[in-house]
Image: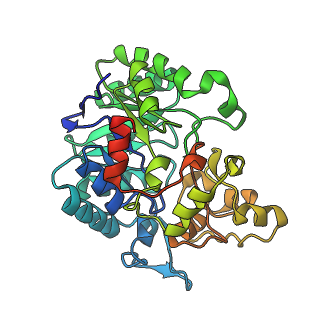
Amino acid sequence: MSFKSFKIGKYTIEKPIIQGGMGVGISWDQLAGNVSLEGGLGVISAVGTGVYKNRAYAEKTVGKEKRPLDAINFYSYSALKKIFENARKICGNKPLAVNILYAQNDYNRVVADACKAGADIIITGAGLPLTMPEAAKDYPDVALVPIVSTAKALRILCRRWKKTHNRLPDAVIVEGPLSGGHQGFKYEECFLPENQLENILPPVVEEAKNWGSMPIIAAGGVWNHNDIQKMLELGASAVQMGTRFIGTIECDVSDVMKQMLVEAKEEEIKLFKSPVGYPARGIKSQLHRDIEKGTAPKVACISNCVAPCNRGEEAKVVGYCIADRLTDAYDGIAETGLFFTGSNGYKLNEIITVKELMDKLMNGE
């Protein structure tokens, strides 16, 4: 089957490939800009923009590491605006999206910030974004794309959006439990056959028909041309892929993280507890060994990044601050960094350009 373009709201995406929004600093201007340039949809992560380019845009920082102080600095508007400006220099007027976590603090403010900064499309997961239309109400041209894990979740969301704002999603991402980072299922649910992407996708495709013709995007464990083809045959209009794009020269994260993935073994990729309240998938690294030994860096909530963490209380329970440890991964500190990856991350064995990767995904090499 041939891969076709598709539309999200008023925006046409030439190739049915969305690059997953990955923070802190994995997908910023260079990666997202180049994916959009090559005809996919580049997605800028709004997480931790205050650590962009050596914290140059955070007005208030703490300590020698210059950790951004509070959510207003961790989710920095001036940094997000600069990231969009740089991405636009690469991709021009091609569509650009932003990923904003529903679980984060200042969600409504960051949605408005992203719209002002130039986002064409907003993607939100990490919770069911029932109030997403309210956050973007002043920007009717910006397309809204929630992430769900079940047909029931889509039904609840569509009912709420229709009732409160007479609006429906412009597209929907269905994410299975093989993705990197935070999952939409409890730990034990991630392993059930009925929750795997190939089984949750068709019911969501059917549910979407009750609400119009919104495109469905499959995510979580999609790795190559054949996987894309399989998802399109199951009714998806496109796929979202995150981990595969970490293995690109243009990916914004440190070379240390890229090398961690290249060297990772299958048995080292695990689901871990997270301060966000959802299980999260990543590489078992020195950080996790230190947590087990009780020698991990002390938790001190500086950035106040996600609401479920309750100002560091949940971080103390699981043994690490997610904002600080993801920042360390961005900075290339292997000893204390938190390195998220999808379940197929161990398959990554080379670092290539975004253009080369897009060609492989489209042509099946």
Any part of residue 339 in sight: no
Image coords of residue 21 (percent x, y): 42, 50
Which residue is found at the position 33% from the left and 31% from the top?
171
Which residue is found at the position 16% from the left and 55% from the top?
92
Toward the bottom, the furthest residue is: 64
Q: Examine the rendered structure and indicate whether residue 160 appears above or below residue 261.
A: above
Any part of residue 323 in sight: yes
Question: In the displayed structure, does residue 311 sit left or right of residue 66?
Answer: right
To which quarter of the image does residue 165 belong?
top left
Q: Quadrant of the N terminus?
A: top left
Q: For this rendering, which residue is in front, 224 or 134?
A: 224
Toward the front, the furthest residue is: 365
To which quarter of the image does residue 306 belong?
bottom right
Image coords of residue 197 (percent x, y): 53, 27
Which residue is found at the position 70% from the left and 56% from the top?
284
Question: How did the renderer colour the structure?
Answer: rainbow
Question: In the displayed structure, does residue 18 sit left or right of residue 325?
Answer: left
Q: For this rendering, which residue is in front, 365 or 34?
A: 365
Image coords of residue 254 (percent x, y): 49, 68
Image coords of residue 255 (percent x, y): 50, 68
Count the labels in the image. Answer: 0
Q: Examine the rendered structure and indicate whether residue 154 appears above or below residue 105.
A: above
Toward the right, the furthest residue is: 293
Q: Quadrant of the C terminus?
A: top left
